[in-house]
Image (spheres, coloured by chain):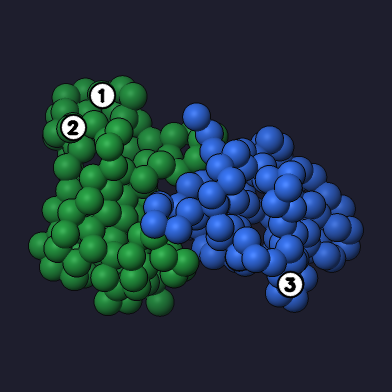
Chain colours: A blue, B green
Amino acid sequence: DQQVKQNSPSLSVQEGRISILNCDYTNSMFDYFLWYKKYPAEGPTFLISISSIKDKNEDGRFTVFLNKSAKHLSLHIVPSQPGDSAVYFCAALEYGNKLVFGAGTILRVKS
Amino acid sequence: DAMVIQNPRYQVTQFGKPVTLSCSQTLNHNVMYWYQQKSSQAPKLLFHYYDKDFNNEADTPDNFQSRRPNTSFCFLDIRSPGLGDAAMYLCATSKTGVTSTDTQYFGPGTRLTVL
């Protein structure tokens, strides 16, 4: 049973526009959420995180929004750049338990 | 400078022939993890070491074993690989426990092919 779902396998965006990557979860006990970014031939690298006590966290061009009632989070990238083209993994953590990943979304930013 | 190194990057083995994947880290982290990621699926935690303490996930097949001879190195042994074990194997480290919010640092992975 997938507890963390990224329903869009891929997303294509024009350079300079906003990229919105979505993630849904089923476990209401998750209290910490992360996004990882993965380039080809490299391992995933941490991008941004958010605690369940917040609904927004911003770091430069990257903002993560959390809607606990909908069990949904999203990653916004503004403006999108070709170097942002990668696979983005959503992950969630329940205190006292292990990190659970989604299957990833491939983002392509076209120049 | 590479912080989590995995060797080899690509491994081909035959059905039933034991194979060992290697991971090393320069971060001096306490925790080392092994994940299995099949095509278009989420990375799935197989097991982890907190220092020398081994923690197996309940649904990890017995076919998968691990060794951590020292802080820097961790090995994944697949005793009798089946076709279903073909996947990307990711090693990761973190400073503190698996349940903490500490960032996990990943290696580039080893792509295992089983013929």
Amino acid under label 2? Asn
Q: Please identify the quadrant where the N terminus of chain B is shown.
A: bottom left
Q: Is residue B11 visible?
A: no
The kind of residue on which mark 1 rests is Gly
Q: Residue at x 86, y 58 (%)?
A: A18
Which residue lies at the image location 71% right of the left edge and 74% below the top edge? A59
What residue appears at the point 89 percent right and 58 percent down from the top-left corner?
A17
Q: Which residue is mark 1?
A: B82
CA distance separating discs 1 and 3: 44 Å
User: Residue B57, how many percent across, how many down?
Assistant: 28, 42
* Circle 3 SS class: strand
- Relative to A100, is B25 above or below? below
Q: Is residue A10 above or below residue B81?
A: below
Please report contact status of discs 1 and 2: CB closer than 8 Å, yes or no.
yes
Image vertical order of residue B4 relative to residue B79, above or below: below
Separation of disc 1 and disc 2 at Cα?
Answer: 9 Å
Q: Tell me the quarter of the image containing the C terminus of chain B.
A: top left
Q: Could you say whether the residue bearing mark 2 is in a helix, strand or loop?
A: loop
How packed is label 2: few (under 14 Cα within 10 Å), some, or many (20 or more)?
Answer: few
Same-chain status of marks 2 and 3: no
| Residue for badge 3 | A58
**Helix, strand or loop at disc 1?**
loop
**Foreground: disc 1 or disc 3:** 3
Q: Is residue A20 visible?
A: yes
Q: Quadrant of residue A36?
A: bottom right
> On the image, which quarter does residue B53 sit in?
bottom left
Tag of residue B63: 2
